[in-house]
Image (cartoon, rainbow, N blue to C red):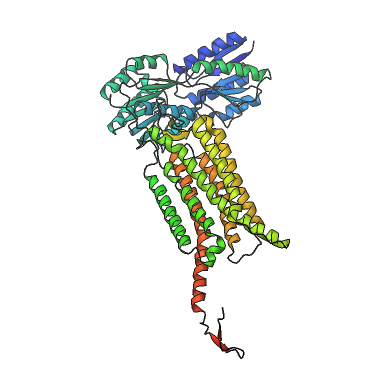
Amino acid sequence: MTKFALIPKSEGDPYFDRVKEGCMDAAKEIGIECVYRGPESYEGAVKKQNDIIYEMISSREVDGIAISVVHSSRIKEAIDKAVDANIPVVTFDSDSADSKRSLYIGTNNTRFGENLAKVLLQINPLGGQYGIISEKGQPNLVERSNGIQVRLKDKYLKKKWTLLSESDSQHDTEIALQDMWTFADLGATAIISCCGWPMYNKTGWKRFTREHSEITLVIGDGNSDQLDLLSQGYNGGLVGQLPYQMGAVAMKKLLEIKEGKSDGQEFSSTNILQHLQVPLDISSIPIEPNFIGKLSILGYFLFSLVAALSFGCGIWVWLHRTHPVIKASQPEFLLGLCLGVLIMASSIIPLSIDDEYYSDATASKFCISFWWLFCTGFTVSFSMLFSKTWRVNKIFKSASKLKRIKVMPKDVIVPFAILMTANIIVLVCWSIIAPQKYIRQAHDGTDDWNRIISTYGTCAAPEGMPYVVLLIVLNSCVLLTANFQAFRARHIKTKYSEGRYITWTVGFALQAFLIGGPVAAMSITDPRLFYVVTTLLIGLLCMVILCFIFIPKVRKKNNEDKETRKAPEVKPKVIRNNFSKKDITISKL
Protein backbone atom coordinates (compact mmCIF):
# COMPACT_ATOMS: atom_id res chain seq x y z
CA MET A 1 0.00 0.00 0.00
CA THR A 2 1.13 3.55 -0.76
CA LYS A 3 2.34 5.36 2.34
CA PHE A 4 2.70 9.11 2.81
CA ALA A 5 4.27 10.71 5.87
CA LEU A 6 2.82 13.75 7.63
CA ILE A 7 5.44 15.55 9.75
CA PRO A 8 4.06 18.28 12.08
CA LYS A 9 6.10 20.86 13.93
CA SER A 10 5.14 19.25 17.22
CA GLU A 11 2.88 16.34 18.06
CA GLY A 12 2.15 18.11 21.35
CA ASP A 13 0.53 21.11 19.61
CA PRO A 14 -3.28 20.66 19.51
CA TYR A 15 -3.37 22.55 16.21
CA PHE A 16 -1.73 19.57 14.48
CA ASP A 17 -4.25 17.14 15.96
CA ARG A 18 -6.75 18.53 13.45
CA VAL A 19 -4.18 18.18 10.64
CA LYS A 20 -3.73 14.52 11.65
CA GLU A 21 -7.50 13.92 11.50
CA GLY A 22 -7.65 15.32 7.98
CA CYS A 23 -4.70 13.17 6.93
CA MET A 24 -6.23 9.96 8.33
CA ASP A 25 -9.69 10.60 6.85
CA ALA A 26 -8.28 11.39 3.41
CA ALA A 27 -6.05 8.29 3.52
CA LYS A 28 -9.10 6.08 4.03
CA GLU A 29 -10.95 7.87 1.25
CA ILE A 30 -8.25 7.47 -1.42
CA GLY A 31 -6.88 4.10 -0.28
CA ILE A 32 -3.46 4.98 1.13
CA GLU A 33 -1.79 4.98 4.55
CA CYS A 34 -1.01 8.17 6.49
CA VAL A 35 2.12 7.88 8.67
CA TYR A 36 1.94 10.63 11.30
CA ARG A 37 5.34 11.27 12.89
CA GLY A 38 6.99 14.39 14.27
CA PRO A 39 8.83 16.03 17.19
CA GLU A 40 7.18 15.53 20.56
CA SER A 41 7.63 19.20 21.41
CA TYR A 42 9.05 22.38 19.92
CA GLU A 43 12.29 21.96 21.80
CA GLY A 44 14.82 20.55 19.35
CA ALA A 45 12.10 20.33 16.68
CA VAL A 46 14.38 21.37 13.79
CA LYS A 47 16.86 18.55 14.45
CA LYS A 48 14.09 16.04 14.98
CA GLN A 49 12.41 16.93 11.65
CA ASN A 50 15.74 16.51 9.86
CA ASP A 51 16.33 13.14 11.52
CA ILE A 52 12.86 11.87 10.54
CA ILE A 53 13.35 12.84 6.88
CA TYR A 54 16.81 11.24 6.62
CA GLU A 55 15.48 8.10 8.31
CA MET A 56 12.65 7.86 5.79
CA ILE A 57 15.07 8.34 2.90
CA SER A 58 17.24 5.50 4.18
CA SER A 59 14.42 3.09 4.93
CA ARG A 60 12.31 3.93 1.88
CA GLU A 61 9.44 3.59 4.30
CA VAL A 62 7.21 6.16 2.58
CA ASP A 63 6.37 7.22 -0.97
CA GLY A 64 5.98 10.89 -0.19
CA ILE A 65 6.38 13.43 2.62
CA ALA A 66 4.22 16.36 3.80
CA ILE A 67 5.95 18.58 6.35
CA SER A 68 5.14 21.72 8.33
CA VAL A 69 8.52 23.44 8.36
CA VAL A 70 9.91 24.69 11.66
CA HIS A 71 12.91 26.50 10.12
CA SER A 72 12.99 26.94 6.33
CA SER A 73 16.75 27.24 5.75
CA ARG A 74 17.75 24.50 8.20
CA ILE A 75 15.37 21.93 6.68
CA LYS A 76 16.10 22.77 3.03
CA GLU A 77 18.93 20.27 2.57
CA ALA A 78 16.90 17.34 3.94
CA ILE A 79 13.95 18.20 1.66
CA ASP A 80 16.23 18.45 -1.37
CA LYS A 81 17.81 15.05 -0.64
CA ALA A 82 14.39 13.43 -0.29
CA VAL A 83 13.34 14.81 -3.68
CA ASP A 84 16.64 13.65 -5.20
CA ALA A 85 15.85 10.20 -3.80
CA ASN A 86 12.59 10.25 -5.77
CA ILE A 87 10.46 10.92 -2.70
CA PRO A 88 8.17 13.89 -3.48
CA VAL A 89 7.79 16.50 -0.75
CA VAL A 90 5.02 19.01 -0.13
CA THR A 91 4.93 21.57 2.68
CA PHE A 92 1.86 22.72 4.61
CA ASP A 93 1.12 25.47 7.13
CA SER A 94 4.75 26.69 6.96
CA ASP A 95 6.87 26.65 3.81
CA SER A 96 10.44 26.23 2.66
CA ALA A 97 10.13 28.09 -0.63
CA ASP A 98 13.81 27.79 -1.62
CA SER A 99 13.82 24.01 -1.41
CA LYS A 100 12.89 21.48 -4.09
CA ARG A 101 9.48 20.82 -2.58
CA SER A 102 6.72 20.39 -5.16
CA LEU A 103 3.92 22.34 -3.52
CA TYR A 104 2.97 24.48 -0.53
CA ILE A 105 -0.47 23.82 0.99
CA GLY A 106 -1.95 26.29 3.41
CA THR A 107 -2.80 29.86 4.13
CA ASN A 108 -1.35 32.88 2.44
CA ASN A 109 0.36 33.97 5.64
CA THR A 110 0.77 37.61 4.65
CA ARG A 111 -2.97 37.77 4.09
CA PHE A 112 -3.49 35.95 7.38
CA GLY A 113 -1.58 38.73 9.13
CA GLU A 114 -3.61 41.37 7.31
CA ASN A 115 -6.78 39.69 8.59
CA LEU A 116 -5.47 39.73 12.15
CA ALA A 117 -5.03 43.49 11.75
CA LYS A 118 -8.44 43.81 10.13
CA VAL A 119 -10.12 42.14 13.12
CA LEU A 120 -8.32 44.57 15.41
CA LEU A 121 -9.63 47.49 13.36
CA GLN A 122 -13.14 46.07 13.56
CA ILE A 123 -13.07 45.70 17.33
CA ASN A 124 -11.07 48.82 18.08
CA PRO A 125 -10.95 51.45 15.31
CA LEU A 126 -9.67 54.18 17.65
CA GLY A 127 -5.94 53.59 17.15
CA GLY A 128 -3.18 53.43 19.73
CA GLN A 129 -0.12 51.26 20.45
CA TYR A 130 0.13 47.54 19.84
CA GLY A 131 2.52 44.66 20.39
CA ILE A 132 3.03 41.51 18.31
CA ILE A 133 3.62 38.01 19.76
CA SER A 134 5.57 35.97 17.22
CA GLU A 135 8.59 33.73 16.79
CA LYS A 136 11.65 34.62 14.79
CA GLY A 137 12.86 32.11 12.24
CA GLN A 138 9.48 30.55 11.48
CA PRO A 139 8.67 31.69 7.93
CA ASN A 140 4.89 31.58 8.29
CA LEU A 141 4.95 33.70 11.45
CA VAL A 142 7.38 36.20 9.94
CA GLU A 143 5.00 36.64 6.99
CA ARG A 144 2.03 37.08 9.33
CA SER A 145 3.87 39.72 11.33
CA ASN A 146 4.71 41.60 8.12
CA GLY A 147 1.06 41.44 7.05
CA ILE A 148 -0.08 42.90 10.38
CA GLN A 149 2.34 45.81 10.17
CA VAL A 150 1.55 46.64 6.56
CA ARG A 151 -2.19 46.75 7.24
CA LEU A 152 -1.84 48.92 10.33
CA LYS A 153 0.48 51.34 8.50
CA ASP A 154 -2.19 52.02 5.87
CA LYS A 155 -2.04 55.75 5.18
CA TYR A 156 -5.83 55.89 4.75
CA LEU A 157 -6.52 54.88 8.37
CA LYS A 158 -8.07 57.84 10.14
CA LYS A 159 -6.77 56.63 13.52
CA LYS A 160 -3.13 55.57 13.55
CA TRP A 161 -1.54 52.54 15.19
CA THR A 162 2.05 52.48 16.49
CA LEU A 163 4.05 49.27 16.95
CA LEU A 164 5.58 49.00 20.43
CA SER A 165 7.60 45.85 19.86
CA GLU A 166 7.58 42.35 18.38
CA SER A 167 8.42 39.54 20.79
CA ASP A 168 10.18 36.25 20.14
CA SER A 169 8.15 33.84 22.28
CA GLN A 170 9.95 30.73 20.98
CA HIS A 171 6.62 28.93 20.70
CA ASP A 172 6.42 28.82 24.48
CA THR A 173 3.12 29.56 26.23
CA GLU A 174 4.67 30.98 29.39
CA ILE A 175 7.07 33.24 27.49
CA ALA A 176 4.18 34.45 25.35
CA LEU A 177 2.10 35.31 28.44
CA GLN A 178 5.05 37.11 30.02
CA ASP A 179 5.47 39.14 26.83
CA MET A 180 1.82 40.14 27.07
CA TRP A 181 2.32 41.46 30.61
CA THR A 182 5.36 43.40 29.37
CA PHE A 183 3.31 44.99 26.57
CA ALA A 184 0.64 45.93 29.13
CA ASP A 185 3.24 47.68 31.28
CA LEU A 186 4.40 49.62 28.19
CA GLY A 187 0.89 50.97 27.68
CA ALA A 188 -0.30 48.76 24.84
CA THR A 189 -3.82 49.40 23.56
CA ALA A 190 -3.88 46.09 21.70
CA ILE A 191 -1.91 42.82 21.46
CA ILE A 192 -1.86 40.60 18.39
CA SER A 193 -0.51 37.05 18.57
CA CYS A 194 0.44 35.37 15.29
CA CYS A 195 -0.43 31.96 16.79
CA GLY A 196 -2.67 30.58 19.53
CA TRP A 197 -0.12 29.40 22.11
CA PRO A 198 -0.70 32.29 24.62
CA MET A 199 -4.19 30.83 25.15
CA TYR A 200 -2.98 27.29 25.86
CA ASN A 201 -2.55 28.22 29.53
CA LYS A 202 -6.21 28.89 30.27
CA THR A 203 -5.65 30.03 33.84
CA GLY A 204 -2.88 32.48 32.92
CA TRP A 205 -4.86 33.73 29.94
CA LYS A 206 -8.02 34.39 31.98
CA ARG A 207 -6.02 36.22 34.65
CA PHE A 208 -4.47 38.53 32.10
CA THR A 209 -7.76 39.35 30.35
CA ARG A 210 -9.51 40.08 33.66
CA GLU A 211 -6.77 42.46 34.81
CA HIS A 212 -6.35 44.15 31.44
CA SER A 213 -9.84 44.25 29.96
CA GLU A 214 -8.95 47.60 28.38
CA ILE A 215 -6.50 45.88 25.97
CA THR A 216 -7.91 44.54 22.71
CA LEU A 217 -6.69 40.98 22.07
CA VAL A 218 -6.57 39.34 18.63
CA ILE A 219 -5.10 35.85 18.37
CA GLY A 220 -4.15 33.53 15.54
CA ASP A 221 -5.70 30.04 15.17
CA GLY A 222 -9.10 28.93 16.37
CA ASN A 223 -9.13 25.51 18.00
CA SER A 224 -11.95 24.34 20.22
CA ASP A 225 -10.32 25.54 23.47
CA GLN A 226 -9.76 29.00 21.97
CA LEU A 227 -13.36 29.16 20.78
CA ASP A 228 -14.54 28.22 24.28
CA LEU A 229 -12.54 31.07 25.78
CA LEU A 230 -13.90 33.46 23.14
CA SER A 231 -17.49 32.43 23.92
CA GLN A 232 -16.79 33.09 27.63
CA GLY A 233 -15.67 36.63 26.84
CA TYR A 234 -11.96 36.07 27.37
CA ASN A 235 -10.91 37.29 23.95
CA GLY A 236 -11.72 39.89 21.35
CA GLY A 237 -11.21 37.96 18.14
CA LEU A 238 -9.65 34.92 16.51
CA VAL A 239 -8.34 34.39 13.00
CA GLY A 240 -8.13 30.71 12.23
CA GLN A 241 -7.06 28.34 9.50
CA LEU A 242 -8.39 25.02 8.25
CA PRO A 243 -5.85 22.50 9.61
CA TYR A 244 -8.12 19.54 8.86
CA GLN A 245 -8.26 20.61 5.22
CA MET A 246 -4.46 20.98 5.08
CA GLY A 247 -3.94 17.37 6.19
CA ALA A 248 -6.49 16.04 3.70
CA VAL A 249 -5.23 18.09 0.77
CA ALA A 250 -1.60 17.11 1.50
CA MET A 251 -2.42 13.40 1.03
CA LYS A 252 -4.39 13.96 -2.16
CA LYS A 253 -1.72 16.17 -3.72
CA LEU A 254 1.03 13.67 -2.93
CA LEU A 255 -0.99 10.93 -4.62
CA GLU A 256 -1.47 13.11 -7.72
CA ILE A 257 2.28 13.75 -7.87
CA LYS A 258 3.10 10.06 -7.47
CA GLU A 259 0.66 9.11 -10.25
CA GLY A 260 1.92 11.87 -12.56
CA LYS A 261 -1.37 13.77 -12.46
CA SER A 262 -0.10 16.93 -10.81
CA ASP A 263 -1.19 20.21 -12.44
CA GLY A 264 2.20 21.80 -11.69
CA GLN A 265 0.93 24.50 -9.34
CA GLU A 266 3.21 25.50 -6.46
CA PHE A 267 0.60 26.84 -4.05
CA SER A 268 -2.68 25.33 -2.91
CA SER A 269 -4.47 27.89 -0.78
CA THR A 270 -6.80 27.19 2.12
CA ASN A 271 -9.38 29.58 3.52
CA ILE A 272 -9.18 31.81 6.57
CA LEU A 273 -11.78 31.85 9.36
CA GLN A 274 -12.67 34.79 11.58
CA HIS A 275 -14.30 34.61 15.00
CA LEU A 276 -14.90 37.80 16.94
CA GLN A 277 -17.10 39.47 19.47
CA VAL A 278 -19.21 42.15 17.83
CA PRO A 279 -19.04 45.25 20.06
CA LEU A 280 -22.38 46.37 21.47
CA ASP A 281 -21.57 49.98 20.65
CA ILE A 282 -19.85 50.05 17.29
CA SER A 283 -18.64 53.61 16.95
CA SER A 284 -20.22 55.53 14.13
CA ILE A 285 -17.99 56.63 11.30
CA PRO A 286 -18.15 59.87 9.33
CA ILE A 287 -19.13 59.29 5.72
CA GLU A 288 -17.10 61.37 3.29
CA PRO A 289 -19.67 63.11 1.02
CA ASN A 290 -17.12 64.57 -1.42
CA PHE A 291 -18.92 67.90 -1.75
CA ILE A 292 -17.45 70.45 -4.13
CA GLY A 293 -17.17 72.82 -1.19
CA LYS A 294 -14.75 75.71 -1.46
CA LEU A 295 -13.58 74.54 -4.87
CA SER A 296 -16.65 76.35 -6.22
CA ILE A 297 -14.64 79.55 -5.69
CA LEU A 298 -12.50 78.47 -8.64
CA GLY A 299 -15.59 78.09 -10.83
CA TYR A 300 -17.11 81.42 -9.86
CA PHE A 301 -13.77 83.15 -10.37
CA LEU A 302 -13.34 81.69 -13.86
CA PHE A 303 -16.91 82.63 -14.80
CA SER A 304 -16.48 86.17 -13.48
CA LEU A 305 -13.23 86.57 -15.40
CA VAL A 306 -14.71 85.31 -18.67
CA ALA A 307 -17.88 87.38 -18.17
CA ALA A 308 -15.81 90.54 -17.63
CA LEU A 309 -13.75 89.80 -20.75
CA SER A 310 -16.86 89.04 -22.82
CA PHE A 311 -18.63 92.24 -21.79
CA GLY A 312 -15.46 94.24 -22.23
CA CYS A 313 -14.82 92.88 -25.73
CA GLY A 314 -18.47 93.37 -26.70
CA ILE A 315 -18.50 97.00 -25.54
CA TRP A 316 -15.19 97.63 -27.31
CA VAL A 317 -16.59 96.23 -30.57
CA TRP A 318 -19.74 98.34 -30.31
CA LEU A 319 -17.84 101.55 -29.56
CA HIS A 320 -15.45 101.03 -32.51
CA ARG A 321 -17.83 99.33 -34.91
CA THR A 322 -17.10 101.90 -37.65
CA HIS A 323 -13.33 101.47 -37.44
CA PRO A 324 -11.81 99.70 -40.48
CA VAL A 325 -10.34 96.90 -38.34
CA ILE A 326 -13.74 96.10 -36.80
CA LYS A 327 -15.67 96.58 -40.05
CA ALA A 328 -13.31 94.17 -41.83
CA SER A 329 -14.14 91.51 -39.21
CA GLN A 330 -17.88 92.30 -39.28
CA PRO A 331 -19.06 93.56 -35.87
CA GLU A 332 -22.11 91.29 -35.79
CA PHE A 333 -19.88 88.20 -35.82
CA LEU A 334 -17.62 89.54 -33.10
CA LEU A 335 -20.62 90.40 -30.92
CA GLY A 336 -22.06 86.94 -31.56
CA LEU A 337 -18.75 85.42 -30.51
CA CYS A 338 -18.78 87.40 -27.23
CA LEU A 339 -22.34 86.28 -26.55
CA GLY A 340 -21.52 82.62 -27.25
CA VAL A 341 -18.47 82.66 -24.97
CA LEU A 342 -20.50 84.28 -22.18
CA ILE A 343 -23.24 81.64 -22.44
CA MET A 344 -20.70 78.80 -22.55
CA ALA A 345 -18.86 80.15 -19.49
CA SER A 346 -22.12 80.44 -17.56
CA SER A 347 -22.41 76.62 -17.71
CA ILE A 348 -19.81 76.63 -14.90
CA ILE A 349 -22.50 77.90 -12.50
CA PRO A 350 -24.74 74.78 -12.57
CA LEU A 351 -21.60 72.65 -12.24
CA SER A 352 -20.95 74.40 -8.91
CA ILE A 353 -24.28 73.26 -7.44
CA ASP A 354 -24.54 70.09 -5.34
CA ASP A 355 -26.63 68.89 -2.40
CA GLU A 356 -24.42 70.45 0.27
CA TYR A 357 -26.58 73.60 0.38
CA TYR A 358 -29.38 72.71 -2.05
CA SER A 359 -32.04 70.01 -2.16
CA ASP A 360 -31.86 67.15 -4.63
CA ALA A 361 -34.78 68.66 -6.56
CA THR A 362 -32.96 71.97 -6.96
CA ALA A 363 -29.70 70.29 -7.89
CA SER A 364 -31.57 68.19 -10.48
CA LYS A 365 -32.80 71.35 -12.23
CA PHE A 366 -29.24 72.55 -12.57
CA CYS A 367 -28.17 69.24 -14.13
CA ILE A 368 -29.91 69.77 -17.47
CA SER A 369 -29.22 73.53 -17.41
CA PHE A 370 -25.52 72.76 -17.74
CA TRP A 371 -26.11 71.04 -21.06
CA TRP A 372 -28.40 73.84 -22.29
CA LEU A 373 -25.86 76.54 -21.50
CA PHE A 374 -22.77 74.72 -22.68
CA CYS A 375 -24.19 73.40 -25.95
CA THR A 376 -25.84 76.73 -26.82
CA GLY A 377 -22.74 78.74 -26.04
CA PHE A 378 -20.44 76.30 -27.79
CA THR A 379 -22.60 76.25 -30.92
CA VAL A 380 -22.86 80.05 -31.08
CA SER A 381 -19.12 80.58 -30.56
CA PHE A 382 -17.83 77.99 -32.97
CA SER A 383 -20.50 78.69 -35.57
CA MET A 384 -19.17 82.24 -35.65
CA LEU A 385 -15.62 80.99 -36.11
CA PHE A 386 -16.74 78.48 -38.72
CA SER A 387 -18.73 81.16 -40.56
CA LYS A 388 -15.77 83.54 -40.68
CA THR A 389 -13.40 81.00 -42.21
CA TRP A 390 -16.12 79.70 -44.53
CA ARG A 391 -16.74 83.29 -45.72
CA VAL A 392 -13.02 83.83 -46.41
CA ASN A 393 -12.73 80.52 -48.26
CA LYS A 394 -15.80 81.28 -50.37
CA ILE A 395 -14.56 84.74 -51.37
CA PHE A 396 -11.10 83.55 -52.36
CA LYS A 397 -12.48 80.57 -54.24
CA SER A 398 -14.65 82.91 -56.33
CA ALA A 399 -11.75 85.28 -56.87
CA SER A 400 -9.63 82.45 -58.26
CA LYS A 401 -12.35 81.88 -60.88
CA LEU A 402 -12.48 85.62 -61.69
CA LYS A 403 -16.01 85.83 -60.34
CA ARG A 404 -17.32 88.70 -58.28
CA ILE A 405 -19.19 87.53 -55.21
CA LYS A 406 -20.53 89.30 -52.17
CA VAL A 407 -21.06 87.20 -49.06
CA MET A 408 -23.65 88.75 -46.74
CA PRO A 409 -24.09 87.94 -43.05
CA LYS A 410 -27.39 86.25 -43.80
CA ASP A 411 -25.54 83.78 -46.06
CA VAL A 412 -23.27 82.55 -43.28
CA ILE A 413 -25.94 82.52 -40.62
CA VAL A 414 -27.60 79.47 -42.21
CA PRO A 415 -25.11 76.85 -40.87
CA PHE A 416 -25.43 78.39 -37.41
CA ALA A 417 -29.22 78.22 -37.54
CA ILE A 418 -29.18 74.56 -38.61
CA LEU A 419 -26.76 73.49 -35.86
CA MET A 420 -28.53 75.53 -33.18
CA THR A 421 -31.92 74.11 -34.14
CA ALA A 422 -30.58 70.55 -34.00
CA ASN A 423 -29.11 71.17 -30.52
CA ILE A 424 -32.34 72.68 -29.23
CA ILE A 425 -34.43 69.78 -30.53
CA VAL A 426 -32.19 67.23 -28.77
CA LEU A 427 -32.12 69.25 -25.53
CA VAL A 428 -35.90 69.71 -25.48
CA CYS A 429 -36.52 65.99 -26.09
CA TRP A 430 -34.01 65.06 -23.37
CA SER A 431 -35.53 67.50 -20.86
CA ILE A 432 -39.03 66.14 -21.43
CA ILE A 433 -38.52 62.41 -22.05
CA ALA A 434 -35.58 61.45 -19.79
CA PRO A 435 -34.60 64.41 -17.58
CA GLN A 436 -31.46 64.17 -15.50
CA LYS A 437 -31.73 63.76 -11.74
CA TYR A 438 -29.18 64.56 -9.08
CA ILE A 439 -28.49 61.43 -7.03
CA ARG A 440 -25.98 60.39 -4.39
CA GLN A 441 -24.20 57.06 -4.83
CA ALA A 442 -21.76 55.06 -2.72
CA HIS A 443 -18.16 54.58 -3.73
CA ASP A 444 -16.74 51.09 -3.96
CA GLY A 445 -15.23 49.84 -0.73
CA THR A 446 -16.51 49.70 2.82
CA ASP A 447 -15.09 49.76 6.31
CA ASP A 448 -14.33 46.59 8.24
CA TRP A 449 -18.02 46.26 9.19
CA ASN A 450 -19.12 46.62 5.55
CA ARG A 451 -20.38 50.13 6.13
CA ILE A 452 -20.28 52.79 3.41
CA ILE A 453 -17.41 55.18 3.98
CA SER A 454 -17.66 57.51 1.00
CA THR A 455 -20.34 58.80 -1.38
CA TYR A 456 -20.50 61.16 -4.33
CA GLY A 457 -23.22 63.21 -5.97
CA THR A 458 -23.76 63.12 -9.70
CA CYS A 459 -26.29 63.95 -12.38
CA ALA A 460 -27.67 60.69 -13.71
CA ALA A 461 -30.14 59.71 -16.39
CA PRO A 462 -29.85 56.03 -17.36
CA GLU A 463 -32.14 56.57 -20.33
CA GLY A 464 -30.46 59.82 -21.34
CA MET A 465 -27.26 58.41 -22.81
CA PRO A 466 -28.55 58.56 -26.43
CA TYR A 467 -29.12 62.30 -26.00
CA VAL A 468 -25.63 62.80 -24.61
CA VAL A 469 -24.19 60.95 -27.58
CA LEU A 470 -26.24 63.04 -30.02
CA LEU A 471 -25.09 66.30 -28.41
CA ILE A 472 -21.46 65.20 -28.48
CA VAL A 473 -21.76 64.21 -32.13
CA LEU A 474 -23.48 67.47 -33.12
CA ASN A 475 -21.00 69.72 -31.36
CA SER A 476 -18.07 67.61 -32.50
CA CYS A 477 -19.27 68.25 -36.04
CA VAL A 478 -19.20 71.99 -35.33
CA LEU A 479 -15.66 71.74 -33.95
CA LEU A 480 -14.35 69.48 -36.72
CA THR A 481 -15.95 71.60 -39.43
CA ALA A 482 -14.42 74.75 -37.96
CA ASN A 483 -11.03 73.04 -37.95
CA PHE A 484 -11.53 71.93 -41.55
CA GLN A 485 -12.41 75.45 -42.73
CA ALA A 486 -9.46 76.87 -40.78
CA PHE A 487 -7.16 74.29 -42.40
CA ARG A 488 -8.37 75.30 -45.86
CA ALA A 489 -7.79 78.96 -45.11
CA ARG A 490 -4.33 78.47 -43.62
CA HIS A 491 -2.47 79.86 -46.68
CA ILE A 492 -4.88 82.73 -47.37
CA LYS A 493 -3.35 86.03 -46.32
CA THR A 494 -5.76 88.73 -45.28
CA LYS A 495 -5.05 92.23 -44.14
CA TYR A 496 -5.46 91.46 -40.45
CA SER A 497 -4.33 87.79 -40.50
CA GLU A 498 -7.69 86.68 -39.06
CA GLY A 499 -7.41 83.17 -40.46
CA ARG A 500 -4.26 82.44 -38.50
CA TYR A 501 -5.78 83.36 -35.15
CA ILE A 502 -8.99 81.47 -35.85
CA THR A 503 -6.91 78.39 -36.76
CA TRP A 504 -5.07 78.61 -33.44
CA THR A 505 -8.36 78.95 -31.59
CA VAL A 506 -10.18 75.98 -33.11
CA GLY A 507 -7.00 73.89 -32.98
CA PHE A 508 -6.64 74.54 -29.26
CA ALA A 509 -10.30 73.66 -28.71
CA LEU A 510 -9.90 70.36 -30.54
CA GLN A 511 -6.84 69.37 -28.51
CA ALA A 512 -8.48 70.49 -25.26
CA PHE A 513 -11.51 68.27 -25.81
CA LEU A 514 -9.46 65.30 -27.02
CA ILE A 515 -7.37 65.43 -23.83
CA GLY A 516 -9.69 66.95 -21.24
CA GLY A 517 -12.86 65.14 -22.32
CA PRO A 518 -11.66 61.60 -21.45
CA VAL A 519 -10.09 62.85 -18.20
CA ALA A 520 -13.39 64.42 -17.14
CA ALA A 521 -15.31 61.25 -18.08
CA MET A 522 -12.96 59.05 -16.03
CA SER A 523 -13.26 61.31 -12.97
CA ILE A 524 -17.07 61.30 -12.86
CA THR A 525 -17.07 59.40 -9.53
CA ASP A 526 -14.77 61.99 -7.96
CA PRO A 527 -16.85 65.21 -7.92
CA ARG A 528 -13.96 67.43 -6.88
CA LEU A 529 -11.61 66.24 -9.58
CA PHE A 530 -14.41 66.29 -12.16
CA TYR A 531 -15.33 69.84 -11.17
CA VAL A 532 -11.75 71.14 -11.37
CA VAL A 533 -11.07 69.46 -14.73
CA THR A 534 -14.36 70.57 -16.31
CA THR A 535 -14.32 74.16 -15.06
CA LEU A 536 -10.69 74.64 -16.10
CA LEU A 537 -11.48 73.16 -19.51
CA ILE A 538 -14.44 75.49 -20.06
CA GLY A 539 -12.80 78.55 -18.52
CA LEU A 540 -9.54 78.20 -20.43
CA LEU A 541 -11.36 77.51 -23.70
CA CYS A 542 -13.45 80.68 -23.31
CA MET A 543 -10.42 82.84 -22.48
CA VAL A 544 -8.42 81.38 -25.38
CA ILE A 545 -11.24 82.23 -27.81
CA LEU A 546 -11.46 85.83 -26.59
CA CYS A 547 -7.70 86.37 -26.35
CA PHE A 548 -6.79 84.84 -29.73
CA ILE A 549 -9.54 86.74 -31.55
CA PHE A 550 -9.59 90.13 -29.82
CA ILE A 551 -6.02 90.85 -28.68
CA PRO A 552 -4.68 90.96 -32.29
CA LYS A 553 -7.58 93.26 -33.28
CA VAL A 554 -6.97 95.63 -30.38
CA ARG A 555 -3.29 95.82 -31.30
CA LYS A 556 -4.05 96.37 -35.01
CA LYS A 557 -6.55 99.10 -34.22
CA ASN A 558 -4.14 100.87 -31.86
CA ASN A 559 -1.31 100.64 -34.39
CA GLU A 560 -3.47 102.09 -37.18
CA ASP A 561 -4.63 104.89 -34.91
CA LYS A 562 -1.00 105.72 -34.07
CA GLU A 563 -0.02 105.75 -37.76
CA THR A 564 -2.94 108.04 -38.58
CA ARG A 565 -1.92 110.48 -35.86
CA LYS A 566 1.72 110.49 -37.03
CA ALA A 567 0.89 111.08 -40.73
CA PRO A 568 1.84 114.73 -41.86
CA GLU A 569 -1.03 117.09 -42.55
CA VAL A 570 -1.41 117.92 -46.26
CA LYS A 571 -2.17 121.60 -47.05
CA PRO A 572 -4.69 122.33 -49.80
CA LYS A 573 -3.22 123.52 -53.10
CA VAL A 574 -4.90 126.30 -55.09
CA ILE A 575 -4.66 126.07 -58.92
CA ARG A 576 -5.65 128.98 -61.09
CA ASN A 577 -7.83 128.04 -64.00
CA ASN A 578 -7.15 130.24 -67.01
CA PHE A 579 -10.60 129.57 -68.32
CA SER A 580 -12.40 130.48 -65.12
CA LYS A 581 -11.96 132.67 -62.14
CA LYS A 582 -13.10 129.97 -59.86
CA ASP A 583 -10.62 128.38 -57.50
CA ILE A 584 -10.50 124.57 -57.57
CA THR A 585 -9.42 123.05 -54.21
CA ILE A 586 -7.84 119.50 -54.30
CA SER A 587 -7.06 117.63 -51.12
CA LYS A 588 -4.58 114.80 -51.28
CA LEU A 589 -6.12 111.84 -49.52
- Above or below, comparing residue 377 to residue 492 in the picture: above
On the image, the x and y values in percent for residue 506 come to 58, 53
Say whether residue 461 is visible.
Answer: no
Q: Quadrant of residue 505?
A: bottom right
**In the image, farthest residue toward the right:** 401
Q: Position of residue 424 (x, y in %)?
A: 53, 40
* 286 or 23, nearer to the observer: 286
The quadrant holding residue 230 is: top left
Q: Is residue 275 visible?
A: yes
Q: Nearer the viewer, residue 199 or 515?
A: 515
Q: Residue 131 appears in which quarter of the rendering?
A: top left
Q: Please tell me which residue is depicted at 60% across the width and 48% down the height of the picture.
A: 415
Q: How many marks?
A: 0
Q: Quadrant of the N terminus?
A: top right
170 shown above or below 333: above
Quadrant in which the C terminus appears: bottom right
- Please state the horizontal and vertical placement of residue 175, each as a whole percent of the image: 36, 26
Q: Position of residue 243 (x, y in %)?
A: 49, 18
Furthest residue in direction front, as rendered = 580
Q: Is residue 67 above or below residue 546?
A: above
